Amino acid sequence: MTKTPRSVCPVCLRPVPASHETVGDDTYLIKECPDHGAFRTVVWRGEPGFGQWARPKIPSPPRTPRTRADRGCPLDCGLCEAHRQHTCTAVLEVTWRCDLGCPVCFASSGTGAPADPSPEAVGHLLDHVIRASGLCNIQLSGGEPTVRQDLPHLIRLAKAKGFPFVQLNTNGLRIGSEQGYAARLAKAGLDSAFLQFDGTEDAAHVSLRGRPLLDAKLKAIAALSEAGIGVVLVPTVVPGVNDHDLGAILRLAADHSPGIRGVHFQPVSYFGRYPAAPGDSQRITLPELMRLLESQTGGAVAAHDFMPPGCEHSHCSFHANYLVTEDRELSKLSAGAPCDCTPRAAEDGACKAKAFVKRQWAQPEKSLPMAGDAPDDLDAFIARASRHTLAVSAMAFQDAWTLDLERLKGCCIHVVAPDGRLVPFCAYNLTAMNGETLYRGKS
């Protein structure tokens, strides 16, 4: 059994003691609420092992804590003085309206949405981010941000305030259907699109989003690539729905290089109203994703390629980088080497993550020039690698059953609450079994 973290009760969200228990190759989070009983949920299955997947960090508290650590994690978010990581990405929700009604949604957007924040309010929230964490990466999110007619203005606003990397979290429907819209976003300064993309088959889109969307997604990819906006595909991975399609998603991404800059898999998390606890068969863990990617790519992507993150907590994610060759195959770039497990300052990891995202997820302007009239193999490799690289990663967001407060304290993805507080993503979206939230809609 591991050291004792804490978690929350899925029924009442009360902080409770918790521990990890490994049985065979599987690791479970077990906890007990004095009022609502015991809970046991799988969080890790198979190799690489839960205990070996580590990258120690020296905590770096927020530059300007907004709240005090009085009641204990996760009840003091703001960020509080006990948080252990700087902001890598600040998620700013610019609307709660949406043009889809997805069964799977962090924000439960669309129905009965409040009014959009004004441009002035958005500007004030960006100022709060600067005071709290400096010029981090900004992700404009929602809802669906493209329902706002003034979205280009908001992008220009973020750029004018000095944010070096502005990304759009989008379903891509308007981008793919409205002629010239992607070009307007690019002209405003948009660097990257975090594009919801659940599979190469329409069955996955119907199951997760309620309608066939593959053609619309492909049109969005084409429009964004033509406009010079880097594309990151973001599949929500659900067992029995699209977990068989992961290799095909990578092949599609390679076929659309260099427009597509990365694929960022997100194992399904259970936010919203779930009167019955999701069964372990309804979950897919990070090591399972690694092994599925290996089997579905014929070993071109190998489980041992992936490394723990340098920014967020080790058990939150994995990543590796690949060169897309001229025949559209994947060749590993930063992989296979053992992780340097010397403890490093968490702030250093955040800085490196921000720089990598800006460099990799934005579309490169042009290839590096080759030396001489007859380039050698190294020249050709450098020229190819300057454009045709693909980042493959995954992020396991936590819900009320899987929440580990040790992980939460190391979170570097922070939602900008309407009152300007920065709240770790998993805390902001956390819901009890009846759908009651801890932070969303409470400020």
Image (cartoon, rainbow, N blue to C red):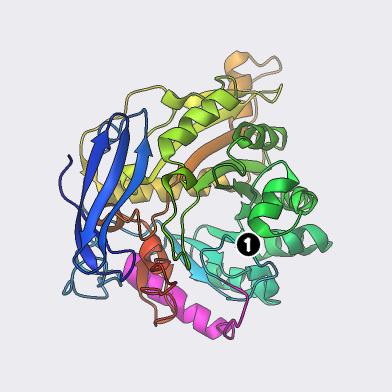
Relative side of 361 to 29, left or right: right
Secondary structure at badge 1 equals loop
Check the image and report above or below for 170 versus 98. Answer: above
Q: Is residue 56 visible?
A: no
Q: Quadrant of the N terminus?
A: top left
| Label 1 neighbour load within 10 Å: few <14, some 14-19, many 20+ | many
Magenta region includes residue 119: yes
Three-letter code, disc 1: Gly
Magenta region = 109-133
Check the image and report above or below for 25 versus 140. Answer: above
Check the image and report above or below for 383 versus 70. Answer: above
Q: Quadrant of residue 88?
A: bottom left
Q: Residue furthest right?
A: 179
The answer to which of 284 and 414 lies nearer the viewer is 284
Relative side of 307 to 300, left or right: left
Mark 1 — residue? 189
Residue 108 image offset from top left, x and y in percent: 55, 70
Residue 129 image offset from top left, x and y in percent: 39, 70
Q: Quadrant of residue 404?
A: bottom left
Magenta region includes residue 295: no
